[in-house]
Image: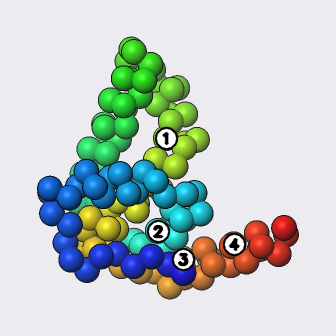
Amino acid sequence: MLPKPNPVRIGHDDSQSLLHWVSELSHQELLNFSAYLPNDLSHYAQQQKTWLEHCIDLLHTELHRRPNAGEIANQILNTDDSRRFRAYYALRFPERVTLDPDTLFEVNSSRMRIHLDS
């Protein structure tokens, strides 16, 4: 079942709680949020840029040096960071996302294929 964004706007004080909650989601749980599409791409891009800058800062801390372009690309392409941002955005700004029924069908269909193949 697809998680529904909380209709109550999550305040700034709760951002850390939300970030922690999103960081604990599994890959499969994160896929559910693919069905939420941003209504305002400008706002989405601004928030995503801030998110990516934070991810780069965390990678910098982990490596004890500034990451190079390849390490940054690897972090973005080979982790769930982008999916985590989508989940965070849908939950943090529920009034700025729309549920796309076509994407919802694709997510559920791919899950069914995974279960049938197992």
Mark 2–mark 3 Cα distance, whole angstroms, equals 10 Å
Name the residue beneath numbered marker 3: 103
Tell me if label 1 and label 3 are in contact, CB under 8 Å. Answer: no
Query: Considering the image in quadrants, where does the C terminus appear?
Result: bottom right
Mark 3–mark 4 Cα distance, whole angstroms, equals 11 Å
Residue occupying the point 50% across, 85% down: 101
Identified by mark 4, the residue type is Ser
Q: Is residue 91 above or below residue 44?
A: below
Tell me if label 1 and label 4 are in contact, CB under 8 Å. Answer: no
Nearest to the observer: residue 98 or residue 54: 54
Name the residue beneath numbered marker 2: 33
- Identify the mark at residue 76; answer none if there is no mark: 1
Residue 42 can be seen, yes or no = no
Tell me if label 3 and label 4 are in contact, CB under 8 Å. Answer: no
Query: Considering the image in quadrants, where does the N terminus appear?
Result: bottom right
Of the two numbered discs 1 and 3 on the same chain, state the one appearing first in sequence.
Answer: 1
Image coords of residue 115 (percent x, y)? 77, 73
Nearest to the observer: residue 8 or residue 56: 8
Name the residue beneath numbered marker 4: 110
Tell me if label 2 and label 1 are in contact, CB under 8 Å. Answer: no
Residue 46 can be seen, yes or no = yes
The crowd level at tag 4 (other Cα within 10 Å; few <14, some 14-19, many 20+) is few
